Amino acid sequence: MKLVREQSSRAPARGGRSRRRTAPPSRLARLPGGAFIRDAYAELRKAHWPTREQTIRLTGLVVAISLLMAMLLGLADFVFAELFDVVVA
């Protein structure tokens, strides 16, 4: 009785190699957390950074909204303090 070997559905490895060679780790990668720092730096390089004009405009928007919210909360605090004085007194 002859056994028939099933053919694999996977494509053969490129160049006849099954494993890739990797470069030895750099000094940074050998430090504790070094791989994280390297990967984080690589991701930051891929990020889309705003232009100077966009940064200035958005910073102004954040400051304006923060001031508006501070005034609204200050007004609400003043009103509730006056109401508390009227109720307690």
Image (cartoon, grey):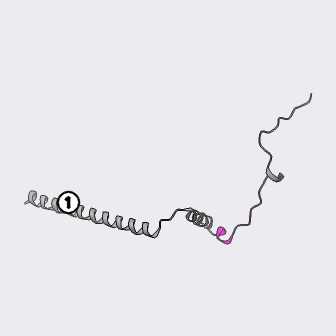
Residue that sits furthest to the top in the current view: 1
**Depth check, front residue: 49 or 9:** 49
Q: Measuring from the top left, give residue 89's x and y in whole percent.
A: 7, 60
Residue 9 on image: x %, y %: 77, 39
Q: Which residue is drawn at 52% across and 62% down?
A: 48
Residue 19 lies in what quarter of the image? bottom right
Predominant SS of the magenta segment: loop
Q: Where is residue 33 in the image (x, y as percent from the top left)?
A: 60, 66
Question: What residue did someone put label 1 on?
Answer: 76
Q: Which of 19 and 34 is in front in this view?
A: 19
Q: Residue at x 67, y 72 (%)?
A: 27
Q: Where residue 25 sits: x, y (%)? A: 70, 67
Q: Can residue 67 be seen in this view?
A: yes
- Do we see residue 17 in this rendering? no
Residue 75 falls left or right of residue 8: left
Q: Residue at x 60, y 64 (%)?
A: 42
Count the marks: 1
Check disc 1 and give the amino acid type: Ala
Q: Give the quadrant of residue 44.
A: bottom right
Farthest front residue in view: 53
Task: Specify the segment rendered in magenta.
Answer: 20-30
